[in-house]
């Protein structure tokens, strides 16, 4: 998804999706699986140089981000699947976040 002031970041994310899909197809005959991990907000140091500490604290307040260990647990679960299963992509998001672009889900 596009975001203002992050053109290169957004372009590389889109490229990774296409690359992962093509690589998965190329390597499937060799029994090599490729999974694209699409993470929503993850509490990392990504914004440490872009935002002041107060803004970062507000962004991650109230458990509004996936923790790195959550992503690791999902990755380990994918790796533990039998060879007959291919997970092309998984999205991991905080509960409140409706989509990976950061748009909050609407209340029902």
Image (cartoon, helix red, strand yellow):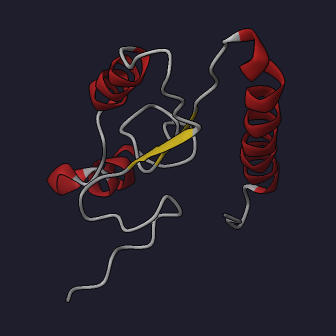
Q: In this view, does 26 lie to the left or right of 58?
A: right
Residue pushed farthest bottom? 108
Residue 55, horizontal then vertical, whole percent: 37, 55
**Horizontal and vertical percent position of residue 51:** 49, 49
Front one among 11 and 85: 85
- Quadrant where the N terminus sits is bottom right
Residue at 79 percent across and 42 percent down: it is: 12
Is any atom of residue 38 visible in this view? no
Residue 49 in which image quadrant: top right
66 with respect to 92 (left or right): left
Q: Which residue lies furthest to the left in this view?
A: 62
In which quarter of the view is residue 43 placed? top left
Instruction: State left or right for residue 88 relative to residue 30.
Output: left
What residue is drawn where x is 29% and y is 23%? 73
Q: Report if residue 106 is visible in the image.
A: yes
Q: Where is residue 32 in the image (x, y as percent from the top left)?
A: 67, 13
Instruction: State how many labels appear.
Output: 0
Q: Which residue is drawn at 30% across and 42% down?
A: 66
Residue closest to the eye, 14 or 78? 78
Q: Is residue 85 above or below residue 50?
A: above
Residue 3 is situated, as x and y percent measured from the top left of the image, at 67, 65
Q: Quadrant of the C terminus?
A: bottom left
- Among the 4 quarters of the image, the one containing residue 67: top left
């Amino acid at each position: 998804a596009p975001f203002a002031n992050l053109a290169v970041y957004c372009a590389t994310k889109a490229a990774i999706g296409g690359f992962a899909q093509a690589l998965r197809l190329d390597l499937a005959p060799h029994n090599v699986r490729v999974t694209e991990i699409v993470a929503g907000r993850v509490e990392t140091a990504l914004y440490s140089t872009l935002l002041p500490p107060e803004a970062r604290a507000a962004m991650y307040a109230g458990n509004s981000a996936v923790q790195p260990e959550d992503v690791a647990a999902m990755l380990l679960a994918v790796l533990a699947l039998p060879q007959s299963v291919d997970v092309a992509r998984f999205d991991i998001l905080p509960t409140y976040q409706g989509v990976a672009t950061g748009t909050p889900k609407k209340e029902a």
